[in-house]
Image (cartoon, rainbow, N blue to C red):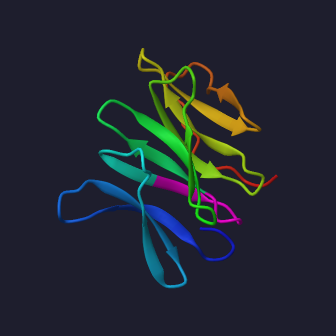
């Protein structure tokens, strides 16, 4: 949830069409489905500007995305070494955190800032996920 009270999340509906992201704002729900998605969209975070991050699913991959509702623009976030990318949260500076999976199954945390991915891992782990980022 951001300071304006906007909430993002994930829903499954009862007609079997998979998962959908949502934005709850001003007592109204809006569905968020990335245009590239074929099997579902999950939404993880929203910043003060209303920019939303999440992941969309296709038959062969999961990729992160950045959605700007003010312009209707979806930007795919695909880590260049990843087989799957999950974007989880965004701060007010536009920095995005999440995780990605390599072909060998190892999962790593990432920070995406200024067009650059920075990978980080908890020492001696095979799985690191980042779910939140603050404004500091």
Is 30 or 9 nearer to us in this picture?
Answer: 30
Q: Residue furthest top?
A: 104
Query: Does the segment drawn in magenta span residue 15?
Result: no
Residue drawn at (31%, 44%) of the image = 38
Q: Is residue 44 one of those drawn in magenta?
A: yes
Residue 48 lies, in percent from the top left, at: 71, 66
Residue 59 drawn at (x, y percent): 29, 35
Instruction: State the residue at coordinates (49%, 85%).
Output: 27
Quarter of the N terminus within the rendering = bottom right
Residue at the far bottom: name it. 27
* Numbered disc total: 0
From the viewer's perspective, is residue 85 above or below residue 124? below
* Percent position of residue 86, x then y: 50, 39
Q: Residue furthest left?
A: 15
The residue under the point 25% across, 65% down is 13
User: Which region of the structure is painted magenta?
Assistant: 43-51
Q: Position of residue 28 (x, y in %)?
A: 46, 81
Say if 104 sits above or below 23 in the image.
Answer: above
**Near-viewer residue (79 or 89):** 79
Is residue 133 rendered to the left or right of residue 74?
A: right
Residue at left 73%, top 50%? 94
Position of 100 with respect to 120 (left or right) is left
The answer to whether 98 is drawn above or below residue 9 in the figure is above
């Amino acid at each position: 949830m951001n300071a304006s009270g906007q909430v993002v999340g994930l829903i499954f509906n009862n007609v079997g069409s998979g998962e959908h992201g949502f934005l709850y704002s001003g007592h109204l729900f809006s569905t968020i489905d990335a245009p590239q998605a074929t099997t579902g969209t999950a939404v993880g975070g929203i910043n003060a500007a209303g920019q939303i991050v999440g992941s969309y699913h296709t038959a062969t991959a999961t990729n992160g995305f950045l959605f700007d509702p003010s312009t209707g623009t979806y930007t795919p976030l695909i880590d260049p070494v990843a087989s799957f990318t999950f974007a989880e949260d965004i701060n007010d500076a536009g920095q995005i955190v999440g995780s990605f999976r390599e072909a060998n199954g190892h999962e790593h945390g990432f920070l995406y800032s200024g067009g650059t991915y920075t990978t980080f891992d908890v020492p001696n782990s095979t799985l690191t996920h980042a779910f939140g980022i603050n404004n500091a």
